[in-house]
Amino acid sequence: MSSATQHFSQGPDADGFFGDFGGRFVAETLMPLILELEEAWEWSRTDEAFRRELEGYQRDYIGRATPLYYAERLTEHLGGAKIYFKREDLNHTGAHKINNCIGQILLARKMGKKRIIAETGAGMHGVATATVAARFGMECVIYMGATDIERQQPNVFRMKLLGAEVIPVESGTGTLKDAMNEALRDWVTNVDSTFYLIGTVAGPHPYPAMVRDFQSVIGRETRAQILEKEGRLPDTLMACIGGGSNAMGLFHPMLDDESVHMIGVEAAGHGIETGEHAASLNGGEPGVLHGNRTFLLQSDDGQITDAHSVSAGLDYPGIGPEHAWLHTQKRVEYVSITDHEAIQAFKLCCELEGIIPALESAHSVAHLRKIAPDLPRDHLIVLNMSGRGDKDMASVANWLEQHGDTDKLPNTTVEAAEPGRIDDMQPPHDVAKKTGETE
Amino acid sequence: MTTRISRRFAALKEENRAALVTFTIAGDPDFEASLETLKGLPAAGADIIELGMPFTDPMADGPAIQKAAQRALRAGQTQRKTLEMVREFRRNDQDTPIVLMGYYNPIYRYGVGAFLKDAVDAGIDGLIVVDLPPEHDGELCLPAMNAGLDFIRLTTPTTDDKRLPRVLENTSGFIYYVSVAGVTGAQAPTPESVEQSITRIRAHTDLPIAVGFGIRSAEQAAAIGRFADAVVVGSALVQCIETADSPQAGTQAVHTLVRTLASALPPQR
C-alpha cells in the first residue's frame, strides 16, 4: 500500500498496488505465469543488453525519437497558450502502441514463448502486435469485438496482411472488454506456449507498470525536447485516456515535477449524464475486472455496463489502475469530452495543422480548445498526438453524415464510409481462408 | 466446530463414495425455475450444491456458462436475489451444503462485510471466487473464514509443488482441482493424469479434493470418482437448461442428468 511519503512515480508496491488500485485478480491457472512475467520484467529494467536492444528497435524500427512539434497555427487560432504536439502519430504503424509491443515481444522471446495473443479495440494495438509478431516470426492471434471489426475494417485488413489471425468476439457487446475476456480465456487454455501482449496500462500486475515503463519513452523524450526548445518544463501535459497508456507514458517521467499540471481526457460519448459514455473516472465506481482494481462502469449490483464512444479506441469500461490512483490523489486532473466536441476538434486539427489525428487524440485537442484561449501566451502545453486518424475515416464520415455536418467535406471522404467501398478492402477469399477468418 | 461441508464429507467417507457436486447459475433461466431446480437437487443425488453468482464478464468460463449468466442477468437476477434463493432453499433443507461460486466484483460492490453477513444469514456454507488468488487473501478469504464460511480454493495443473502450500494455506472445506488448464466446459482430461495430480496434492493436505472442468458424462464421473473425493459437473447441467423447451423442462432435465451421474459414482478404493 502507498505511504504518505511515496513519490508519485514510484509505484506500484510489491503486490502491484497503486494505493488501493491495481493488484493481481486472476484465476489460479494464470498466477504462476504472471509471477514469471514479473520476474522477466524486473530483470529487463536493469539489464543493459536488453536496454540496448530495445533502444535499437525504438530508433531503427519504430523511428524514434518522435518530434515535438510547435503547433503554430492552432496556437494562433486559439490565441492563448503555446501548444506543442508530441508526434506519436509518426511512429511506425501510426500510433504509440508500437512502443509497448516492441518491449513486450522482446520479453516474450526471452521467456521462450512462441505464440502471441492480444485484444484490440480500434485495431491499433492489434496492428502493432501483428507487426512485431511478423518481425520476430511468431504466431499471432488477435481477439477483436465483432462490432469493432465492422467499424475498423482497414485495421482488420492490415492485421491479416501481417499474418495475424483475427478472431471476432460475438459475446457481450462485441467490443474491447469482450475481446479482453476472450483473450484471457485463450491464455488460460494455452498458458504454456502463449504470451498475452496487453495493449494498455491495465490488467494484472505487472502489466500496468510494465506497459507504462515501455511507454515512458514518450515522456522522457518530451522532457528533453521541451528543455531544449524552451529551456524549461511544460506547464501542462495533456493526453486522451481509454485504458490510458499514451497518457501514462507522457505523464510518468514528470509526475514528480510539481510544477507540471497534467490533464487526462476521457470520452464522454453522448454526455456523462446520458449514461452512454466511456468515462470510467468521471462516471464510474471502483471495482475489480480483468485482473485489477480500478474505476469501472458498472451497475449497483457490480455488473459491468457498456461503454460508448465514437472512438473505438476509447470504448472500454475501465482504466489503468495508476490513473485511478492519480485521480484519487488529485495529482492528475481528469476531464471528459463528448463525441460531438471530439469530432469538431478533429476537423479543426485537420484544417489548421494538416494533421489528421486519431479520434482518440481528437478528444484531447477538444479539451485544448476549451482551456488554451484563457491561458497566458507563455503557458506551455504539450499534447500527446497519440496516433493518426487514417483508421477513423469511416467513423468520422458516418458521424458527420448522421449529423448532417458534411458541408465542408469532399464527396470522396463520405464515400469512403460506404459499405461497398469498405468491402473493396476485404482480402481476397483465399487469403481470408488462409488466415482462418470465417466470412 | 463442524460445518455442513465437513459433516457431509464425513458421512460420504462412511459410505465410501465420492460426492457429486452440481453447478448451476442462480437465476438461470429465471428466478422461479432456478429455485425449483435448486430444491430438487438433493433428492436427485447432489451431495453438495455449487451455485453460480451470475457476472457479465466471466473470464474463466466457457460459452455454456457465459450464456447461462447472461440469461440469468437478463431475467433480473442480482446478488440479493441469489441470497434470497438460498434462504428459500434452507426452509426445507438444513443439511445440503451450498457453496457460492463466482467473481469478485459483484461481492466487492455489495460490500464485503455486508455480503458476508447476508451470506451467513441466508445459509451459505462456502465461497469460491475465481479471481482472488492467495496473494489477495486479505480482501475476502480471511474475513469469510472469520465469519464462519469455508473458503474453497482452486488449484490447477499450473500450480506446482512450490506454489501449492501457498494456495492451501487459508483453504478450508475442500480443494477444487481444476483438471485442465482452460475454461469451464473444456475437453476432459484423462483420468490417469488427474489421478497423478490428486496424489500429488494429497501429499500436501488432508482436505477433501474435488475435481471439475470437463466432466460431462456418467462414465467420466465414475472414472474420476474412483479416486477423487468429489466430482463437479457444471457445463453439462447448464446446457440442459439452455436446450430445454421451457424453464420447467430445463429443471426436469437437470434433475434427470443429476440422477444418472449420482447413480454412476462407484464405491471407492
Image (cartoon, rainbow, N blue to C red):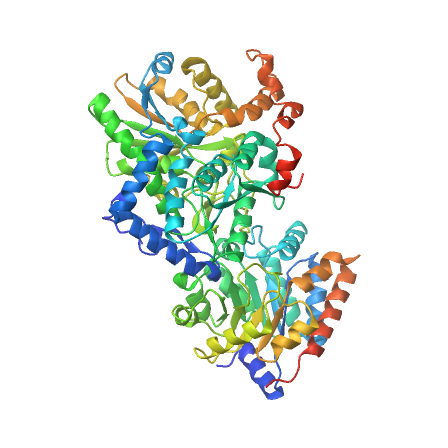
Q: Quadrant of residue B100?
A: bottom right
The percent coordinates of residue B246 (x first, y second) are 79, 57
Instruction: State whether residue A404 is above or below residue A317.
Output: above
Q: Quadrant of residue B265?
A: bottom right
The percent coordinates of residue B219 (x first, y second) are 69, 74
> Which residue is rendered at x = 46% and y = 64% of the image?
B158
> Which residue is rendered at x = 38% and y = 46% of the image?
A208
Relative to B188, is A246 on the left or the right? left
Q: The N terminus of chain A is located in which quarter?
A: bottom left
Instruction: State whether residue A80 is above or below residue A97.
Output: above
Residue farthest along the bottom direction in this orientation? B14
Residue farthest along the left direction in this orientation? A231
Closer to us: B16 or A344: B16
Instruction: State whether residue A90 is above or below residue B157.
Output: above
Q: Quadrant of residue A254?
A: top left
The percent coordinates of residue B267 (x first, y second) are 64, 85
The percent coordinates of residue A272 (x first, y second) are 51, 33
> Which residue is rendered at x = 45% and y = 70% of the image?
B145
> Which residue is rendered at x = 40% and y = 20% of the image?
A369
